[in-house]
Amino acid sequence: MKVNMGGADRILRLILAAILVALYAYDVFTGILGVILLVAAGILVITSLVSFCPLYKVFGLRTCKAN
């Protein structure tokens, strides 16, 4: 699995995940929508930590410098 995410992309994903978790924690989103957004936040965190986004691979995108 080759890295395809740059530093800025990783930071933005972590910030977005934190916002989604905070909105769920403050009951802005509840129920099924809240659970879906929590799963999305988890996916954002995982892809940020491993620096790999499967959708980027499918569409041939890279936000990191070429190795």
Image (tube, helix red, strand yellow):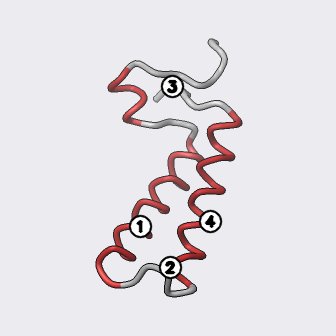
Give the class, few, some or many, for how many residues have Cα within 10 Å of label 1's Cα (few <14, many ≥20): some
Which of the two labelled residues, at mark 1 and mark 2, occupies the earlier sequence position? 2
From mark 4 to mark 1, how far is it between C-alphas?
11 Å
The answer to whether the residues at label 1 and label 2 have Cβ atoms under 8 Å apart is yes
Image side of residue 10 versus residue 4, left or right: right
Residue at 70 percent across and 37 percent down: it is 8
From mark 1 to mark 2, how far is it between C-alphas?
8 Å
- Could you say whether the residue bearing mark 2 is in a helix, strand or loop? helix
Q: Which residue is mark 2?
A: 24
Indicate whether 40 appears above or below 8. Answer: below
Q: Which residue is mark 3?
A: 2
Image side of residue 54 versus residue 41, left or right: left
Residue at 49 percent across and 62 percent down: it is 41
- Could you say whether the residue bearing mark 3 is in a helix, strand or loop? loop
Where is residue 11? Give x, y as percent: 69, 46
Amino acid type, residue under disc 4 in the picture: Ala
Amino acid type, residue under disc 1 in the picture: Leu
Indicate whether 49 appears above or below 51. Answer: below
Where is residue 26? Give x, y as percent: 57, 86
From mark 2 to mark 4, how far is it between C-alphas?
10 Å
Give the class, few, some or many, for how many residues have Cα within 10 Å of label 3's Cα (few <14, many ≥20): few
